[in-house]
Structure formats: structure tokens, C-alpha cells
Amino acid sequence: MTDAFSTCQKNVLLAKSPSTQIEGVFAATTGRSVPEEQEALLQQWLEEEVGNLPAIESVPSARRVSVTLTSTWLEGAELLMTSLSDLNTSPEVTQCADQQLSELNTLASSELQDHAVAELARLPAEERVTVAGSAPWEAVVPQTDHQTAGCAAVSVEVLNDDPAVLAWSLECDAETVPPVLPAQPIQDAVPFYPVPIEVPYHEILWRDWEDLSVQPCVLEHVSKNTSLFEFRVMSYNILAQDLVEQGLDLYVHCHPDILSWNYRLPNLLQEIQHWDPDVLCLQEVQENHYWEQLEPTFKEMGFACFYKRRTGTKTDGCAVCYKHSRFQLISLSPIEFFRPGLDILNRDNVGLVLLLQPVLSEDLGLKEVSPLCVANTHVLFNPRRGDIKLAQVALLLAEIDKIARTTDGSYYPVILCGDLNSVPDSPLYKFIRNGELSYHGMPAWKVVSGQEDFSQQLYPRKLLAPLWPSSLGVTDKCQYVTLCQPKKFGEREYSRDFLLQFRFCDVACERPPQLVLLEGVTDAKPAASAGEHSAVTAVLKRHNSLSFIGKQCSGVIQHGLNLTSVYSHFLPHRGRPEVTTMPMGLGATVDYIFYSAEPVENKAGECGSRRLYKDGALKLLGRLSLLSEDVLLMANGLPNPFCSSDHLCLLASFGLEISSL
């Protein structure tokens, strides 16, 4: 009987009807009563299973919870955002543990075998539940319309208090669920351990909101007379369905039903709608899903949307959405990283860069706020090609430099979101955060440093300077050549190797009159061969056409955007690193939200080469906490019945200073 109850719980949790239709506004469904054939099946099951129970074995003490969902829906990610105390005290959740436990104990007795059907018949219609495995379950798709008062009331009775079961209302059809064969794990795969039934999912996957506006470092820069334009930014890799179907071996730990798009879409939309971001940056957005389902739904939620599909034959891309009641578009710049003929940029990744003007309320009077630059990208995954990733990021930073630069040479506040496929403290991460990277001679895989370790390779690919040719039109400071201006008129930076080419020119061979004469040191005149003279002459003829030959020749690239991460990438209360994704049971952080800040000079002996920042005009007010690898393992990894992507969403709250005109 214990196995039968476990089977019932598993079917309630995982089995879902594939016929769910998703059309703009979603409606709730109402449970149906138990057919006569299922009552007979129940009686037969009781006669077979209860009769075989040993006398000393008792019925498992599972609690049955009666739930009624009325004007709002409690399912999927919504339970992750509702505290346990709220669930227990809600008038819509009535716990009947003692009464239902006695009924379960009565089921074990031989007397109930004669009148089990009669007991079921006496239950109210809204408290009936079908026998596990007798009919398919169908998920109630959440409404995406803002008006939820018209939702139909749904009453469900479940066999335990697991919120993963409470997350769905149940609907039975006339058909019978075909048996589902267990997924076969691939060789050497990391084993996943499902959540114990007695541990609620919403307690395991609980994510706290961290209020950073009360920290002294923030209060110091926000005076009582300074008002802020507050807004939320979400970055989310939602896992394109085509990529799921192309890489099913990555999701052997998942039940097939929770991988279907009809199941995942309502969960994703509900999570986005709950956190209510003002700016939404999405990666792995499948093109047909965007135009047919996501964009119409987002427009109903008040968003203006922009999308860029990956080049080539790829079917997914990036999207940036913002609420038109909070922002107005100044400029839009989609960017393609694929450049024909360049091996360093031969992949189909893309990005989007927007310049937005915050909309202030009319009651603020003569006030103004700085425009905001928002960038979104999804960088190449391949762990062996860190050189391509570095070039893609440099090209994106050049586009941000063009969009966010002001007339006086400074920058508007910048927020950079995306899946960078690089872990914290990798060279690529340090380049974005510290503004400089010396890459010459570095193994290509090390630029990613963390996805995989190829240090045992005999001949690893190494990065050589320059990383990209001058024909790309991007300088070593991640700026477009056409927009790059020297610091002062006539002033340029040249490498040592470039200057050595002039050591035998006529000017270099003339002894300065003020030079002290030292025998054997300054009395000798350098002599050059005829070939060297001709080489110098050729260099002098073309040196004026070389507008940027500098540090890139020595393998150093830079940028001046002063970006720092919203997250610290470590959970101090757990003593473990944060993770944003979990492929094959291995947690890693690859998703980021960077934002503009002001650099602080490092004190002697502190932080080494790590650049320190403090908030400037753009202030970080709060963030949604991330989870650790061990917590996600308890929830059977990603995706799971609650989190319908293999990435966690990132969410941060910012404030822009409002000044007088």
C-alpha cells in the first residue's frame, strides 16, 4: 500500500495532459467527479493491496489537504514567493490532517473494503480525487490578463501537503494515462536525488529579497532631499524548446511532461508577472514562440518588446522588453557577432543595446533624470573557444560605448545583462569588472576558466596579439575607430616594438647638443645598414595612417565603462557559492547583471588587482537572492516542476538620481 500511495503522489505531481492550449489569456478549469469504472478499480485495488498488508504495518501518515483556489492562482513559482506561514494562515488553505488521517487508518481496516465506494460517494464534489493512474492530469494555465477576478473557482483534494501538488488543480479525462517508463541515466552522469515527500518544494527553493537600500554605503549617497527613479531589471535565460529537444540527454533527470513547452510557458510567464520587472532581458527566446505567444502576452502586460534572432540557422535569440509607462525609447542597436571572413567572430551569437529615457510623473515638476543604457546578450557556450567569447564581449562593449557616450565624453548609466557562459573570477569576468585584461599567451580555455579544465592538453590553443584584425574597426580599448578621439591633439600611444623601428632614422642618429659626452657610451653614433634605412623610410611613410597601434600589440585590451556585478557570487550564511544554472548536476554561475558604478582607489595591500566600486548616479537598492548547488540538488536540479528553465532568473532593483532642471 505504501508503494501505491507513492505511485499516486508521483502521478499527481508529474502526469500532465499534453493537450493544454495556450492562447493569450488563460482560464482555470474545474475538477470532475469520479466515474463508476474508477470506483470499481479503487475497490479492486483495496481488496488486493490491503489484504496483502502485514498486521504490524500501518498506513503511511500522509496528510490530505483540501484547497480552494478562487480569484487568484497559487501554482508553480507562485508558491515559491509565498511564505509557509501565509499558506498555513490563508483562508483558502484548510488543513484537515487529523480527520483525514483517521480516514486513512480506516482504509487499512478490513471493514472499509465493503463500503469504500460508499465513502467516496459521500464526499462533496469538490473534494473528490481520481485514482492515481486512471486518468491524465491537466495543469491549470495561469491567466496572463491583469483582470483575475473572473477566474473560475477550483477545488482540489490531494493526498499530501506537498506544494508541488498544491501547485496544480486537477482535471480528469476519459482516457487512461499510459504507463511512463523510467528515464535511463546516461553513463557517468551525476545522480540526482529527488526531494523527500515530507519536504515542501517552496521551502527548499525559497529565494529571499535582499534590501540593500538600508546599507550605510547606500544611505551615505542618498540624502533626504534626493529623490530616486526606482525600477526593477530581470535577466532570464528561459531555455528555448528547440534546444531542449536537441539535447534531451542533458535532462534525463526530468520527467518528460515538465519539459513540454505547454507546461513550461505558464510557469515562466507567472514568474515574470509576479516579480513585475520594469525592464526584462531574455535569452534563448525561440523565434516562433516569441511572435506567437510571448510578445502578445508581454504587450498585454504593458511592455514594449524588441527581439533579435541569432544569425544562421539558429531559431532562438535575445529579447529586451520595457514598460512603456516607465521608459521611452531613444535608440535601439541590434548587434550581430558573426563577421564573414573572421575566424575570431564566426559564430551566430547576437545582442541588443537600447538607450531608454525614464518617464517621470508630472507631479515632480521641473525635474530630470539621466537616460539609461540597457544591453542584453548571450555569449558563445563552447568552453574551448574563450578567444571567440572575448572578441564577442569586446564588440558588445564597443556598441555600448557608442550608445552610452555623452557629448562631453562621459557615459550614461549602463546595465549589462546576459548569459556570458563564464564563471566569476575568470579572465573574461575580470575584464568586464576591472576594465583590463592581458591575454597574450593565455590558453583559450582559460578565458572561460571554470566551465571545463583543459590544462592537461599537450598543445592548448593560445591567444596571440592582436586578438582581432584592424579591419574590424575596433580598438584595443573596445571603441569603434571612427568614434575614437585622441586625448590631445597630436598625441598618440605607440608600442615599444613600433618605436624601435625608428631607432636608425636621421633624427635618432643625431646627437642631442645637451647630451653629456661619456667615452664609450654617448660618443658612438649608431650605424644602420642600407636595408634598415629603407625599412625605416617605409615605416615613416605609413605611420600617419596607423591611428591605433598601441597596447593591443602587447596583448592588453581595456574598456572604460566601470561595471560591477549586482551579485557577490557567494552565500555567506551557507558558506557556498551562488549558482545560476545546473547542467548535469554541476552548479555554476554564468548569468550576470552588471551596472555602472564609480571606482574607488584601492588602499595599499587591499584586494590586490581587484577594482573596488561605490554607487554613483545609478544605485543598487535590492536583489533577489540566488541558491547554492546543494539546495538545487535537493530539488532534483533544473528544470524541475517549479522552475521551468535550466537557469534561475536574476532580479535587481535600482534607483536613478532625479535632479532639478
Image (tube, grey):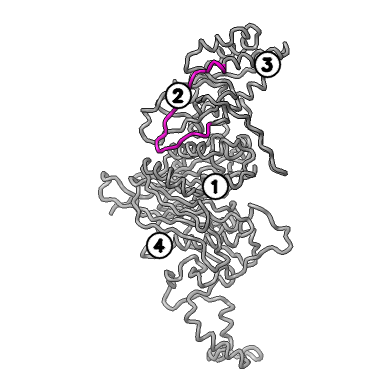
Label 1 to label 2: alpha-carbon separation: 32 Å
Q: Amino acid at mark 4?
A: Arg
| The disc label shown at residue 405, or none | 4
Q: For the point 35% across and 32% down, which residue is it?
A: 147
| The disc label shown at residue 30, or none | 2
Q: Are marks 1 and 2 in contact (CB under 8 Å)?
A: no
Q: Is residue 28 magenta?
A: yes
Label 4 to label 1: alpha-carbon separation: 38 Å
- Quarter of the image that includes the C terminus: bottom left
Bounds of the magenta segment: 17-38
Q: Amino acid at mark 3?
A: Glu
Percent coordinates x, y for residue 569 in the rendering = 57, 47
Q: Are marks 2 and 4 in contact (CB under 8 Å)?
A: no
Label 3 to label 1: alpha-carbon separation: 43 Å
Label 3 to label 4: alpha-carbon separation: 74 Å
In the shown orientation, is residue 146 left or right of residue 242? left
Label 3 sits on residue = 49
Label 1 sits on residue = 242
In the shown orientation, is residue 270 left or right of residue 645? left
Percent coordinates x, y for residue 425 in the rendering = 60, 54
Q: Earlier in the sequence, mark 3 or mark 4?
A: 3
Q: Amino acid at mark 2?
A: Thr
Q: Secondary structure at mark 1?
A: helix
Q: Earlier in the sequence, mark 3 or mark 1?
A: 3
Label 2 to label 3: alpha-carbon separation: 31 Å
Q: Secondary structure at mark 2?
A: loop
Q: Earlier in the sequence, mark 2 or mark 4?
A: 2
